[in-house]
Amino acid sequence: MKKIVIASENQGKIEEIRPHLAHAGFEVYSMADFDVPPVDETGTTLLENALIKARALKNVTNFMVLADDSGLMVEALGGKPGVYSSRYAKHGDDDANNQKLLTNMADKNNRFAQFKTVIVIIDQDDKEYVFEGELSGYIHTVLEGEHGFGYDPLFIPVGYHKTLASLPPSVKTRISHRKQALDQVLVFLRQRG
Ligand code: IMP
């Protein structure tokens, strides 16, 4: 059976991706199954960070590897928080990050923003492939909703009138930036056979 390793220790993310890869005929492993030295995500773009994670994992396995990196790009803030999304105010503190975003957007009329995901695959021959997904929307003026994580309570997708955190989780699963990127990965993997 074909084998693939996901370069993440985030169990939620792994469980989101695993069924799709399994359905495409892969035996799925995570970074926890390997002895990978800690990596610093020092890149200045999502692609650089995804490559850093994928290459670090590829150093310790011959299996195909998959790494992703995501972020929120807000037009009026010149693309911030972008690659620094998880540590905009404080690392891993969604409430503090959302409050900082609200404060910085207080005087902005242009509320357009995009979630972006970059997925890097490195195959058994060390060839690197890049896939991208995005979700466009607007930054709301107040926090709304309980679902999801990160900036979901502030993000209203184009074509909707509620934040991602207020919409049913099944909607996010269908339209998310991660899903768009993953769909391309699955097409690629199926075509390779
Ligand atoms: P990661 O690369 O998927 O871990 O995402 C990095 C950061 O981007 C997260 O910690 C969140 O702050 C933000 N982010 C990425 N995807 C989403 C999402 O689907 N909803 C809300 N925030 C997200």
Image (spheres, rainbow, N blue to C red):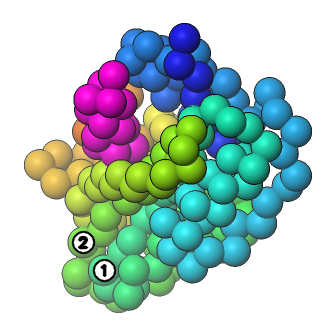
Q: In this view, does 176 lie to the left or right of 97?
A: left
Say which amino acid is labelled 1: Glu
The secondary structure type at the circle numbered 1 is: helix
Q: What stretch is highlighted in magenta?
A: 178-193
- Label pair 1/2, CB-CB below 8 angstroms: yes
Q: How crowded is mark 2: few (under 14 residues within 10 Å), some or many (20 or more)?
A: some
Say which residue appears at 82% left-offset and 33% top-offset: 34
The residue to which callout 1 is attached is 75
| Predominant SS along the magenta part | helix
Q: In this view, does 113 lie to the left or right of 50?
A: left
Pick whichever of labels 1 and 2 is earlier in the sequence: 1
| Res 78 quadrant in image | bottom left
Say which residue appears at 62% left-offset and 75% top-offset: 43
Image vertical order of residue 117 relative to residue 146, above or below: below
The residue to which callout 2 is attached is 112
| Res 86 quadrant in image | bottom right
Within 8 Å: ligand 1 and the Cβ of disc 2? no
Residue 179 in picture, x, y percent from top left: 34, 38
